[in-house]
Image (cartoon, rainbow, N blue to C red):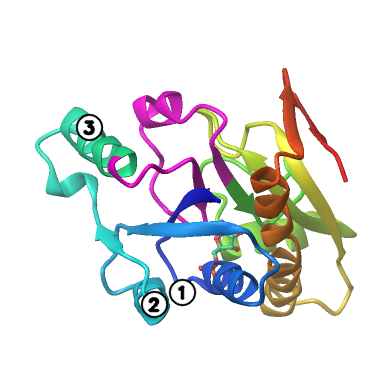
Amino acid sequence: MMNCAVFASGQGSNFDILLQRKKAGDLHVNFVLMVGNNSSAGVFEKARKYGIEVLHCSPSHYLDEKEYCSSLIEKLEEKNVQLIVLAGYMKKLPAQLVHHFKEKIINIHPSLLPAFGGKGMYGSNVHKAVLDYGSKVTGVTVHFVDEEYDHGPVIIQEPVRVFDTDTCETLAARVLATEHAVYWKAVEAIACGHVRIQGRKVVVNA
Ligand code: GRF
């Protein structure tokens, strides 16, 4: 089974669903490490509940980015990590790490990229921008990570309707529920070898 590390900074509801799907036998990967930059984040508790090793690691713990990056890569190599799953990770990954794990890092974003993505587009900022723009549809994107924010090849996108009555909170809740429905499927497709990257495009075989 593929060894996965999850990087997360927040409540970790996506990570929780991945762990639940694994427990239910739907997801065939090993979660070998959870990396987080914020030790008070709820996601640490979730990892511990499932007995997953955690690593509290922030750029501020190191002299410079090079040292931070080498130490992270060393840990990920030691755990034989084959796929890095970003699940609400709030730090931009250093380019060296992205190169080292080229096409082995995925992210989930709460909009239909390239709309409402990029620097500063996270959490409620995304849903507020969608509502302010008057979009009738938003959604979820799972994509490979490259050096640019919210930019790499798209693996799965799932639309979510925007209703006239929506607030940031109601829309965020519906989008998050959709994230929970799709992220594990993307991870499972990769783990089963059903995902191929051809240039900018991703082909997912059923
Ligand atoms: C999700 O909305 C995800 O799309 C974004 O960060 C959020 C993480 O939520 N990248 P959670 O911590 O998994 O609940």
Q: Is mark 1 within 8 Å of ligand 1?
A: yes
Q: Position of residue 148 (x, y in %)?
A: 53, 30
Q: Earlier in the sequence, mark 2 or mark 1?
A: 1
Q: Is mark 2 within 8 Å of ligand 1?
A: yes
Q: Amino acid at mark 2?
A: Gly
Please report the bounds of the magenta region as a residue range: 78-106
* Viewer-closest of 158 and 2: 2
Q: Is residue 184 above or below residue 47?
A: above
The numbered dot on residue 11 is 1
Q: Is residue 89 magenta?
A: yes
Q: Amino acid at mark 3?
A: Ser
Q: Which residue is mark 3?
A: 70
Q: Is residue 38 above or below residue 20?
A: above
Q: Mark 1 touching mark 3, by CB under 8 A?
A: no
Residue found at x 48% / y 51%: 4
Q: Amino acid at mark 1?
A: Gln
